[in-house]
Image (cartoon, rainbow, N blue to C red):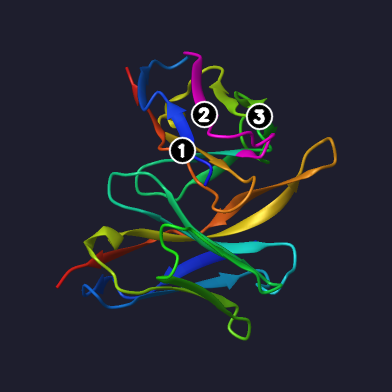
Amino acid sequence: DIQMTQSPSSLSASVGDRVTITCRASQSISTYLTWYQQKPGKAPKLLIYGASSLQSGVPSRFSGSGSGTDFTLTISSLQPEDFATYYCQHTYNSPRTFGQGTKVEIK
Amino acid sequence: QVQLQESGPGLVKPSQTLSLTCTVSGGSISSGSYYWGWIRQPAGKGLEWIGRFHASGSTNYSPSLMGRVTISVDTSKNQFSLKVSSVTAADTAVYYCAREAPMARATGDYYYGMDVWGQGTTVTVSS
């Protein structure tokens, strides 16, 4: 199985900050990487697929990059509604494992 | 607009079988474009991918649950189901069903992502 490791596990940031979350795969997955946002008590929401393509309706302050084993999710200017937990998931093969999540909290 | 809704018992006794159903509305589960899957999340913890199936009949399961989990489909009801046998307290979680869809990048290639989710249903394993 491909293991996905996110860092950091949590971070504190202020509104307007630039935030970067990293996801590393245990083997190369090309660009088969998806990012989700989850708010408390809610189902996850798809943000980015194919490592860098923005899902329809997702604000352009979200961006993704990377290929192979190292990937990044960036929020260019953190907004109040962005405080949530973010998960990466690979779609290279099955099982489609998730990272352990990164919780973005208010500083 | 496709919507998914999980249903099933909220309480299951240890060693018994957990059974959940996901009802799909606004679209056909028989469409060859999509996978239909299950994900779970213990309270306060991360997401765990359980498995998925495709209208072609192919299924994939997490090795950590292999042998205990079955995903099946009832096309006449536009539903798919999850069964987890021999449950323990470790199977207590919120269970989500989701659609995994192919999405095109500007380069023309396709990548899969879970773009539609149910609201989730809480299952507790306890005597």
Q: Image quarter for residue A71? A: top right
What's the magenta region? A17-33
Query: Is B90 situated above or below A4?
Result: below
A77 displayed left or right of B45: right
Is label 3 in contact with label 2 (beta carbons under 8 Å)? no
Of label 2 and label 1, which has the lower sequence position? 2
Q: For the C terminus of chain A, give its image quadrant.
A: top left
Q: What x and y, as percent, mark residue B118?
A: 49, 60
Mark 2 and mark 1 residues within 8 Å of each other at the beta carbon: yes
**Marks 3/1: CA distance?**
16 Å
Q: Image height check: is B60 above or below B70?
A: above
Residue type, mark 3 in image: Gly
Q: Is residue A23 magenta?
A: yes
| Residue B25, percent from left and from top | 59, 71
Comparing B96 with A98, the one in front is: A98
The residue under label 3 is: A68
Name the secondary structure under disc 3.
loop
Q: Between disc 3 and disc 2, whose residue precedes?
A: 2
* Amino acid on which disc 1 is placed: Gly
Tag on residue A99?
Answer: 1
Residue depicted at x 64% and y 62%:
B35
Query: Which amino acid does the dot numbered 2 rest on?
Result: Cys
Q: Which residue is mark 2?
A: A23
Task: Count residues near mark 2 (Cα–Cα under 10 Å), then give few for <14, some for 14-19, many for 20+.
Answer: many
User: Label 3: chain?
Assistant: A
Residue B77 forms part of the magenta stretch: no
Q: CA distance from mark 3 to mark 2?
A: 11 Å
Q: Report crowding for label 1: few under 14, some 14 to 19, many 20 or more residues within 10 A (C-alpha).
A: many
Q: Residue at x 60, y 23 (%)?
A: A61
